[in-house]
Amino acid sequence: MFSIPFLDIAALQSATGTVQLPGSKSISNRVLLLAALCEGQTTVLHDVLASDDTDAMLTALQTLGCEIERQAQQVRITGLDRQSLPAQAQLHLGNAGTAMRPLTAALALLVGPGQAFELTGVARMQERPIGDLVDALRQLGCAIDYLKNPGFPPLALRAADPQKLQASGSIQIRGDVSSQFLTAMLMALPLVAKERDYVIEVVGELISKPYIAITLNLLARFGIVVRNDNWQRFTIAAGSRYQSPGQLHVEADASSASYLVALGGIASDPALGQAITIEGVGEDSIQGDIRFIDAARQMGVHVETGPNWLRVQRGQWPLKAIDIDGNHIPDAAMTLAVMALYAEGTTRITNIASWRVKETDRIDAMVNELSKLGAVVDSGPDWISVAPPAADAWRSASIATYDDHRVAMCFSLAAFNPASVAVRIEDPRCVGKTFPDYFEALFALAQPKPNAVPVICIDGPSASGKGTLAAHVAKQLGFHVLDSGALYRVAGVAARQRGLDIAPEHAPALADVARSLQLVFDGERVLLDGRDVAAAMRSDAGSRDASLISAIPAVRDALLQWQRERAALPGLVADGRDMGTVVFPDAPLKVFLTASAEHRAERRYKQLISQGFDVKLASLREELEARDLRDTTRAVAPLKPAVDAKVLDNSDLSVAEATEQVLQWWRQAYAGAAFATLGHD
Ligand SMILES: O=C(O)C1=C[C@@H](OP(=O)(O)O)[C@@H](O)[C@H](O)C1
Ligand SMILES: C=C(OP(=O)(O)O)C(=O)O
């Protein structure tokens, strides 16, 4: 997961490959709760989504005393024992609608005399309506108080009035704000439907119906058969009792699949043998969002399906604009709004009023962010229309994501824009709600346009702190790191292992060694042919050999390609001596890091002393000055700032200050002018 302030997505060209999708949020949170409601019975759930929303549900169930064992994607749950519910519990449910709504209903019926439960969430959750559900529960005698604003969480639950609970067998609930209210009632009522039927009548239009279908399907798996009269009236029969299915497999998430279906439709060219294969969800899915593929097909995307897989390729290009009622696929329909950037004509998505009360006001969010890119966008209370920018009207944009995972995921697809304008996704961590590794999955499938991967070069003399600075900058940007100094050290070790003397006369053999290095940098470990050589390369002999081998032009040439290939999505921070001058001459940001010999000697001195080495400051300084002289005057790739490098003297800067300076340059260098005019610098 990229837990960083923003993620720059390079101009992307194509996509191909196979992806195994994480579990469905809607199914995971439903089955976690259903399993918890199977009093005393154990259920083993497989392929459960691990994300912020499922964490919210799991943590709440644990707080309530549920026994849960979690191993990777497998969760073993023993159902709650009513008698041992805690007297008090405070449940923080983040922004998970699938936790807040169903838990409210179940706990409103479970809470006993003398017990009190509070349910709350993030600030946005406190703006997401829950009044229709509370009104329905109050008809049953449930005691629910609003702790802040009427109609919204946080809520306090106390024991229901038992007489009223038995008296009211028919409950009315509104269905036009969120289907999750009805889902919540359907999952809670089996807890009380012992002696009599309970009937739920939906008032007004029921939106997002396919989510009710998921609920009914999963209830049946847990032994509860609900009569559905035309989506208007639902009957839970007397004698209903939760019965664990023992084991249950969670399908992959069909809403998450929409971004990858769109990816294939935009960027997988069948003529080049490209396709996106999505595993874990397919035509047999119980999730309504699988119907996104119909909309994608209407836009011209080629989709093949199997029971639990999808294979997607570009069909018609540009895509066809469509006019679609998005009510049945409220989450996946957002993806259509971004696909519209690649369609001929204006795409209209209607009947999506619920977008306004989800993670953010999604209609406004889509209008704002699509407009930044230059699209022609319009909207109303329950619709949005999108026409792509004219060829010369694309603008680079820093996409605000409103703590909404779907905004972040959708807009990553804008990076295929024909104008190659830069796309920056702010707060990419928000995808943690349902698809924590979304960007990793995207980068594994997508290929950048030639030379589009952003590279930051940090060159400089010995002990200037390049490595530390590179690591800090890379961490902030989510980029890879190339420590080219380490590369020469490994080349030296490899040469010694093959019994070669490191001298100019062996240049061809040494270059062969360099060319064929089988190398993996894995945290602190450096694997050469599968063996860790970290200690050898950092020894004194390793340093001497690195210095010798790096002075051999044929070796430098041999390693050039290997270094260039490290420029992988989303980007690279390369540190060394000739990164900006030789290896990545087109890098958008080159930093030449210096510090006075006095400061560098002092830093190295402190470092070595703290490691227990007996060294003298004066001789360290002499060594550094001698090395500087050698480095700056050598014939091959002498150490010098690239003409377009920014010189950073960090003699008096902390690592944090130096990092901030580089990031500031980066924010400007990478499409900076365009972002700056949008106030997002
Ligand atoms: O029941 C569910 O799992 C969901 C129902 C839908 O909400 P609405 O019914 O509020 O549209 C959907 O947007 C949400 O992501 C998940
Ligand atoms: C609306 C969504 O979430 P929630 O389950 O919180 O309603 C969503 O995932 O798009």
Image: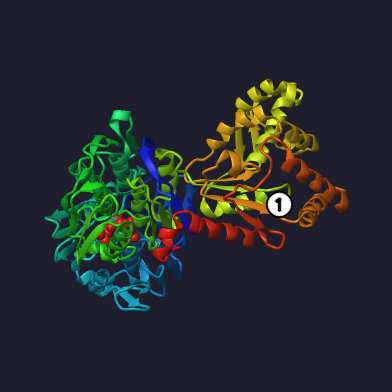
Left or right of 654? Residue 262 is left
Quarter of the view holding residue 45 = top left
Q: Residue at x 33, y 71 (%)?
A: 127
The residue at which mark 1 appears reads as: 464
> Can residue 499 be seen from the camera position used here?
yes
> Can residue 21 be seen from the camera position used here?
no
Residue at the extreme left: 230
| Rendered position, 535 above or below 31 | above
| Rendered position, 191 above or below 41 | below
Q: Amino acid at mark 1?
A: Ser
User: For this rendering, which residue is in front, 480 or 239?
Assistant: 480
Q: Residue at x 17, y 49 (%)?
A: 322
Left or right of 312? Residue 620 is right
Q: Position of residue 491 (x, y in %)?
A: 68, 30
Quarter of the view holding residue 114 = bottom left
Q: Secondary structure at mark 1?
A: loop
Q: Residue at x 27, y 39 (%)?
A: 282
User: For this rendering, which residue is in front, 526 or 135?
Assistant: 526
Colour setup of the view: rainbow
Quarter of the view holding residue 315 = top left
Q: Position of residue 165 (x, y in %)?
A: 25, 70
Tell which quarter ligand 2 is in: bottom left
